[in-house]
Each structure stands twice: as C-alpha cells, then as structure tokens.
C-alpha cells in the first residue's frame, strides 16, 4: 500500500470513529446494547460499513492514534483487544502509522504482534516507516520486539521505503537491526540502488559503511 493510501486510512479512521461514537449514543439511548460488528471495508478504506454501537476496539484505536494512553487503558479494561483488526489493519498498524512511539510501546507491552500482517500484507514496521511524520523510535521498538527488518517486500522493503521517503534516521535504525540495503522488493530496485540513482549520498555512505563493517565483523 502506498504512503498516500495509508494516510487516507488514517483520515478515514478519524471520521469513522466520530461516526461510530454517534452510533454509540444512539444505541445507548435506544437501550439495545447488543455488540456491534465493528468496521468493515475494502483494501485501502475504512468504515465502508459501520454498525452500531461503537466498539471498544475502535475506542482503543482512537485513543492510541491521538496519544491518549489513559483512554487506551480504559478501553482495555472495557474489553478491547490489543490485536484487534479494523479496516484490514491491526491496532498496532494504526499506532505505528500515527507516529506515536508511546502508542507502539504500549501495544507491544499488551502483547500485540510485531509481525502481524495487514490484509494487504503490510507489517507494523512498514507502517512505522510510512508514518504521518518520521518516527525512528517506533521502528526501533518494533524491531526490538522481533519485527523482521526485511518485511514487507511488496512493493518494496522497509529500508527502500525509508530511502525513497528520505527518512534517514529510520534508515539508520533499520540498518542497526540488520536490514540489507541490497535486498529488493517484489516490484522495484534495492535501497542502495535507489540511493545511487537519486543522488542520496548520505544514504549511500550509510549503506556502504555498514556493509564494510559487517564484512569486517564476519
């Protein structure tokens, strides 16, 4: 999924949460109280179908993408699932995409899967690379929790994505955890090839110096 697609999901979720909250009020007033089915949508969208009342999983996502951990605590106490899926992504995908490392750390402590796949095959690490604003700490937390630095590979690796987005600090973190600058995704060139082609000298130096250090260590 492209970065624009991920940002669209984030903006769509914000609207969806607002709608779902209104549905919760409606449900409370009607005293129906049955569990809702949450969000359903095709790839790249959220909220294609919203069923009242609002679920605690949606409340958890809303709290985390806004960095409100006390509200996240309340959602978990109310039964929210740290590994819930909404709109094809896990809660951790949303937290990583939000650019709030404290939200990522929070979910990892609650047992969220650092390598869980979205419906399109993306990983939380892939979302961290494409976050609303650069968040190398989110990437580090995921890698420390066992995230594979080479996944996803479609359409490109996390390191290739960080390079094309000019996110140097994120690239440094990925390299520190073993990412291979020569690795290629399913549809494009490697991070090293991209950096050379586009004159990103700082990235080229990072990749070549790390490669030399790894060769020496071996």
Image: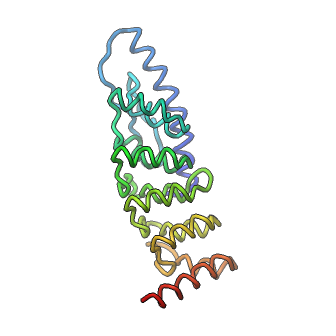
Q: Residue at x 42, y 32 (%)?
A: 73
Say how the picture is coloured: rainbow
Quadrant (top left/top right/bottom left/bottom right) for the C terminus: bottom left
Residue 104 placement (x, y as % from top left): 47, 48
Q: Residue at x 45, y 15 (%)?
A: 25
Residue 44 placement (x, y as % from top left): 47, 48
The quarter of the picture where residue 3 lies is bottom right
The quarter of the picture where residue 144 lies is bottom left
Residue nearer the viewer, 73 or 119:
73
In this view, the residue farthest toward the front is 217
Question: Would residue 88 be seen by someone viewing this image from the given angle?
Answer: no
How many marks on residues? 0
Residue 155 placement (x, y as % from top left): 47, 67
Q: Against 155, is 38 above or below?
A: above
Residue nearer the viewer, 84 or 7:
84
In this view, the residue farthest toward the left is 34
Horizontal arrangement in the rendering, residue 55 relative to residue 166 (left or right): left
Q: Against 205, is 41 above or below?
A: above
Q: Residue at x 35, y 33 (%)?
A: 80
Horizontal arrangement in the rendering, residue 90 relative to residue 127 (left or right): left
Question: Would residue 182 be seen by someone viewing this image from the given angle?
Answer: yes
Residue 2 placement (x, y as % from top left): 53, 58
């Amino acid at each position: 999924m492209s970065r624009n697609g991920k940002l669209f999901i984030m903006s769509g979720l914000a609207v969806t949460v607002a709608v779902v909250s209104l549905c919760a009020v409606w449900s409370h007033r009607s005293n129906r109280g049955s569990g809702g089915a949450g969000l359903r949508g095709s790839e790249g969208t959220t909220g294609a179908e919203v069923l009242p009342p609002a679920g605690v999983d949606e409340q958890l996502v809303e709290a985390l993408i806004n960095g409100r951990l006390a509200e996240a605590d309340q959602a978990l106490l109310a039964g929210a699932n740290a590994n819930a899926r909404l709109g094809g992504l896990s809660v951790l995908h949303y937290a990583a995409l939000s650019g709030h490392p404290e939200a990522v750390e929070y979910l990892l402590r609650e047992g969220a899967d650092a390598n869980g796949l979205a419906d399109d095959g993306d990983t939380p690490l892939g979302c961290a690379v494409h976050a609303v604003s650069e968040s190398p700490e989110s990437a580090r937390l995921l890698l420390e929790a066992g995230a594979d630095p080479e996944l996803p590979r479609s359409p490109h690796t996390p390191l290739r994505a960080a390079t094309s987005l000019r996110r140097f600090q994120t690239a440094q973190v990925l390299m520190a955890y073993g990412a291979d600058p020569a690795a290629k995704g399913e549809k494009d060139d490697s991070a090293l090839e991209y950096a050379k082609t586009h004159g990103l000298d700082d990235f080229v130096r990072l990749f070549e110096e790390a490669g030399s250090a790894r060769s020496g260590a071996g």
